[in-house]
Amino acid sequence: MAAPGSECGGSDGGYRDLRDVRVELDPGEARGGGGGGSAVCFWLYLSSSARPSSVILHQVTAGDDNKLPFLALGEGNKLLLFPLMRLYKEAPATASFYPWTDTTNLSSTNECPLEKWFHIGCEVTENFMRLHINGDLTAEIHLCSLSGESDHQENANKISLVGNDGKLEGYMYNIEVSSVLGTIQEQYAKNPPFKLSIDYSSSDGIEECDDGIWNIVGGKASCRRNFILEVVLIDAFGEPVKDKEVVSSLVYADNGMVVEKSRDDSEPPLLITCEGLEYPAISRPLPIIRGRALFKLKISQLSSKCDNKLFRIHFSTLHMRRYPFLEAYSKTIRCISRNRTIRPLGSGKRVSSATADETDFLQGLVNADRVNGRLHSHGQSSVVHFHTPKFPKIEGDGMAKVVDTNKILSQNKHARKMVVSKEPQNAMGTDTSTSNFDSFGSGSSWSGSDVDDVETFSDAVVFRYCLDSTYDRSKFLRGAAPTFNKEDLVKLADEISLYSGCSHHRNQILMSKRLLREGADTWSMISKNNERALWSSAVPGIITKFMDIAHSVNRGLSEQDLEVLRGIAGCGEDIGRDEFDRLWYWLYPVAASLSRDKIKKLWDCTSPKWIEGFITMQEAENALRISKEMLKEPGTFVLRFPTTRSWPHPDAGNLVVTYIGSDNSIHHRLLSLDSSAATAENLQDLLLQEPELSQSSRVDRLPTAIRR
């Protein structure tokens, strides 16, 4: 029989605060003949405040005020399961206290995870108790039954499991009690709960200071800038959740109260941009597509007008009760005006959302500006790490490269005309960049009309390109590439490679002219000059264009590949131009990489399948697991294209190897394919540079066509 309030399917009714939990158990079922017993199972979510000695569930009997532990956290935050009173002689006594060293219990082998869902199953029979965690049997103990003693017959069926009276913040989901044993694995596999979180690897337009606070430019419409945050809604198995909506709001960091619109303000504090238009964020929820939703936000309320208070962005699922696991809060935000002077950041700052190419040049730019008697730090902030790993880390691990700041300093001494925009000011003197993700905007110095007024190419243009966000670079190239000839683009690519000491930008700039032309042609073909097109109608055209660019005749795009593309675009049943551009800026560099002969042979080889198609980082990690808790052998790897790198990001179109290291954990490393033909042809050598992969039989079995 199911416990009261144990509705399934992720509905609000399935979630219960520990304070409200009360489950009736009938120990008499455990004494039944024929090996019968009882089983109770549920999903558990504990807050970060949980500590050893915390009792999760008490066991009580009718007419007795004494509460004895049934499920608790022991030393090392390991789960402890105690025998049931009035059923076993080893049940805890009234005087039992933490650490319960003198009390019989079952203990889990691993530390209990906090702020994460996990499944617990308890089996009770006449002589045994068993503890299951995430579907696996963790502990078992033989106990002495009281069933033969007449003194315990009368009240043996009056036991309740109750919550902890608010002393521990926690939640349960889908509590079920059954008189049939062997059903715990089945209960574990169905209707898992889910959790909302923020994927900081996809954020943009944010400066993080050394104190961990985000600086975001807001205020008036002419000054404020877009910033991007992406939320993820996945279930306990890491699978994306569908058919949900998430809404954002601006709240005070100290108390979580919503920032209200003041009398003098005609605009709401937080705005969201959809299809080029701005709306109050609180009134414009976004649908979850493949477990993700991308929020383009602006803040109109300055911290200075709110007693210098700090803010957070609050995300929550729509039409559901508020629970910590269905909410997500950003880091603390200081909303500043555009002309505010930002103090320089030192070399010990932590990288948060800045992309690799932005952090590469920050230290060099600071040194370069000292030549002109100024010290300036740009909005996408952070540090440079002065070390070079064998493969740059990606997708949340941070990325790092070495910058020769002395070379940049020397080159800047011979700087030419320092003009970026039409405004009569030093281009590097004040922070005039913008992250307007939907239009060029009057405040942007990368607007298309500026291109004609810029000397080709001043140091300011080169530095600005290196320093700005990926979207701002794409905005510049969208305006510049159609008007520049091939020689101009080659010159720009060469100068940026020279100033940066990094050639990864080169291919992205050189491909921009064709990328934009092919993208415009493809959109015209699938939209038939309409503003939007049905996704089902667009798919054939996208597949045809992809195979044409990739020169692939044997392998197109699978249903899984198309779902990933749909998630990147962020579209539903139909697709608009902005959504198509997001898709195209990711897909074209991938297709261009696959057009290279050696990489194409890997793509075309499907037995074995060397490149897993278009999969997310989570899907790649799942492919390396035998079960949720067990990984495959070290050295096993998957090749994939990172879904968070789009043109003109220097890593767009490159491969990532996701592999199991010797530490029995999953790692992600970038395989850069863009600089030379030799690099692309010697993919095996790239893989073998990583010692943990050098012993992998999969590397040794790479197709003969790509091996030397």
Image: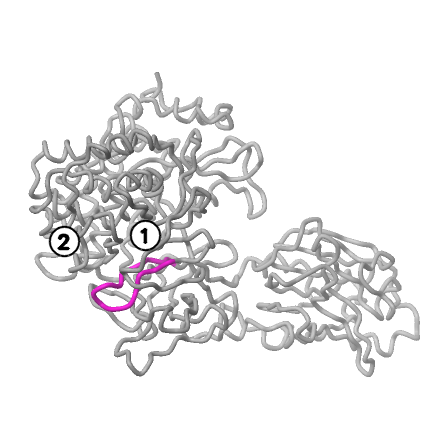
Residue beneath label 2, please?
424
Q: Residue 17 lies in what quarter of the image?
A: bottom right
**Hey, what amino acid is under mark 2?**
Pro
Mark 2 vs mark 1: give the one in front.
2
Q: Which residues are magenta?
A: 215-230
**Residue drawn at point x = 10 percent, y = 61 percent:** 530
Q: Is residue 553 visible to the viewer in this orientation of the structure? A: no
Q: Position of residue 706 (x, y in %)?
A: 33, 22
Q: Secondary structure at mark 2?
A: loop
**Hey, what amino acid is under mark 1?**
Gly
Q: Residue 701 lies in what quarter of the image?
A: top left
Q: Position of residue 300 (x, y in %)?
A: 30, 70
Do the CB atoms of the residues marked 2 and 1 lie less than 8 Å apart? no
Residue beneath label 1, please?
379
276 or 335, nearer to the observer: 335
Q: Is residue 703 magenta?
A: no
Tell me which numbered mark, 2 or 1, is placed earlier along the sequence.
Answer: 1
Q: Which numbered dot is residue 307?
A: none
Instruction: Locate the C terminus by quadrant.
Output: top left
Q: Is residue 233 left or right of residue 613?
A: right
